[in-house]
């Protein structure tokens, strides 16, 4: 079986330039295997790492008066833009683009968005770096626990407001459960929709997760980190999906999360999402079954699951089944021409992503960004893509016709018509714009 270098570079990676595609072409599968074997750099150069300080700021925003709140919000969005820039630079410059794609995939699976909750802006970048990136080749159960313990997720899905009705604090305050986190973990993160659980299971799981919260800031230091607080935890045993959990305190939640992470429905749900992302919008059942089996046999080992994907013939058989998201298109375009980001300026890049409706950490709901072509290919969206490609080409201002570049970066997928259009373009700028707007480049 032949392995298309374009598939390796774009479906598994984030695009490539002429020099990198030469390396990939020698052995596309080995190029991917080497990335899976590599150690993950969990930091992003220039990123702010003090999560507790950021969380304290988020809490202050919610408590502050109007004037102070505006100042704190501005500081939060400044940090958000900085984190977004560091993330973009990493995607453009990395020599392990598969790791970046996996990070984006899992970050979208466990989406935290500032839509509707702008005070979370400062936390979104650090959430991806701490809860997602370190675990993309680890155990799914570890990633799930890391996500649920992170202040960003606890605040986004309101578990910081969830108090056991029969807990010490619940009896005193007369406050009760918030089901959001429990419901979304089951529906969006593990089992999937309509997978054999009831509203009673959601309530029981919400009770299990009471006490999982963020430590309030103290007057003199401390606070702002995850903490399990016993006095707001619903006491006694719980029954979830027919299993009784007798553990005390936080151990009860950890046990329930571990069981959800290894559940057969979770394996099927994760396998389906991975197959949809890496194969096609409607992936073959055979591929889903292989991924499901790999997930179950490995105990949710994501390194093994990724290797299974790379080795599956179904991934390599279809030529260009997936549409690039706007973010992927922009990153791939920079990688194709080896463009320095400073030539454009990240402010303009962010404006472009906003126009294309794909700013990081601004998914429309906890479900994350959609992963089907129909959701990205409205007439207006296509016009915006074409206009962006031409504007990008004008900024790059190539001096020579990009036909040679097209022949390289479209290796294995170029059509005679596309190459002819580029060759006959009235200017190098028009030629580059045609390359980036071509049906082949827009797909992966």
Image (cartoon, rainbow, N blue to C red):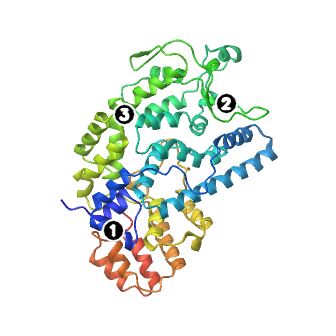
Residue 238 in picture, x, y percent from top left:
48, 15
Nearest the eye: 60 or 430: 60
**SS at mark 1 in the image:** helix
The mark lying in front, picked from 3 and 1, is: 1
The mark lying in front, picked from 1 and 2, is: 1
**SS at mark 2 in the image:** loop
Among numbered discs 2 and 3, the one appearing first in the sequence? 2
For label 2, the crowd category at 10 Å Cα-Cα, with few meaning under 14, some 14 to 19 and many 20 or more, is some
When the figure is inspected, residue 1 is found, relative to residue 288, above or below; the finding is: below
Q: Which residue is drawn at 55% across and 19% down?
A: 249
Q: Give the quadrant of residue 255.
A: top left
Q: Mark 3 points at which residue?
A: 266
Q: Name the residue under label 2.
A: 215
Q: Give the quadrant of residue 117.
A: top right
When the figure is inspected, residue 326 is found, relative to residue 72, above or below; the finding is: below
Check the picture and name the quadrant holding the C terminus.
bottom left
Q: Residue at x 42, y 81 (%)?
A: 431
Q: Which residue is drawn at 32% across and 77% down?
A: 407
- The answer to whether residue 203 of the structure is visible from this angle is no
Q: Mark 1 points at which residue?
A: 23
When the figure is inspected, residue 286 is found, relative to residue 6, above or below; the finding is: above
When the figure is inspected, residue 197 is found, relative to residue 238, above or below; the finding is: below
Q: Residue furthest left?
A: 1
The mark lying in front, picked from 2 and 3, is: 2
Could you give the CA–CA distance between mark 1 and mark 2, rounded to whole angstroms?
Answer: 49 Å
**SS at mark 3 in the image:** helix
Residue 299 in picture, x, y percent from top left:
34, 33
Among numbered discs 1 and 2, the one appearing first in the sequence? 1
Horizontal arrangement in the rendering, residue 193 relative to residue 347 (left or right): left
């Amino acid at each position: 079986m032949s392995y298309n270098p374009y598939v390796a570079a774009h479906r598994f990676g984030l695009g490539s330039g002429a020099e990198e595609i030469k390396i990939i072409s020698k052995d596309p599968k080995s190029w991917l295997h080497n990335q899976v074997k590599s150690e993950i750099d969990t930091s992003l150069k220039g990123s702010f790492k003090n999560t507790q300080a950021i969380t304290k700021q988020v809490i202050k925003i919610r408590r502050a008066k109007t004037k102070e709140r505006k100042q704190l919000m501005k500081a939060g969005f400044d940090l958000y833009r900085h984190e977004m820039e560091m993330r973009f630079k990493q995607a453009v410059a990395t020599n392990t683009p598969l790791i970046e794609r996996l990070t984006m995939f899992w970050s979208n699976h466990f989406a935290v968005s500032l839509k509707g909750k702008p005070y979370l802006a400062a936390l979104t970048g650090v959430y991806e770096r701490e809860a997602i990136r370190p675990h993309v080749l680890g155990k799914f159960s570890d990633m799930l626990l890391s996500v649920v313990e992170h202040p960003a997720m606890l605040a986004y899905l309101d578990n910081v407001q969830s108090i056991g009705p029969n807990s010490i604090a619940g009896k005193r305050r007369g406050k009760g459960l918030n089901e959001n986190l429990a419901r979304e973990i089951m529906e969006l993160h593990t089992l999937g929709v309509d997978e054999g659980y009831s509203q009673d299971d959601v309530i029981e799981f919400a009770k299990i997760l009471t006490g999982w919260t963020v430590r309030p800031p103290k007057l003199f230091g401390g606070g702002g980190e995850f903490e399990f607080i016993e006095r707001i935890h619903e006491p006694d045993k719980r029954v979830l999906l027919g299993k009784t959990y007798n553990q005390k305190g936080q151990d009860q939640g950890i046990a329930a999360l571990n069981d959800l992470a290894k559940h057969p429905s979770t394996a099927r749900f994760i396998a389906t999402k991975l197959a949809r992302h890496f194969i096609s919008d409607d992936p073959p059942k055979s591929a889903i079954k292989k991924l499901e089996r790999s997930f179950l046999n490995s105990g949710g080992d994501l390194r093994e699951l990724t290797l299974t994907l790379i080795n599956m013939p179904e991934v390599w058989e279809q030529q260009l089944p997936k549409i690039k998201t706007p973010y992927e298109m922009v990153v791939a375009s920079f990688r194709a021409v080896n463009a320095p980001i400073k030539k454009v300026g990240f402010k303009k890049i962010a404006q472009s992503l906003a126009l294309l409706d794909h700013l990081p950490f601004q998914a429309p709901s906890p479900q994350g960004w959609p992963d089907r072509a129909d959701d990205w290919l409205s007439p207006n969206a296509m016009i915006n893509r074409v206009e962006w490609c031409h504007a990008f080409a004008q900024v790059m201002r190539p001096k020579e016709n990009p036909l040679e570049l097209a022949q390289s970066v479209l290796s294995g997928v170029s059509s005679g018509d596309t190459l002819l259009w580029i060759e006959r373009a009235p200017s190098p700028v028009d030629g580059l714009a045609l390359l980036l707007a071509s049906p082949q480049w827009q797909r992966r």
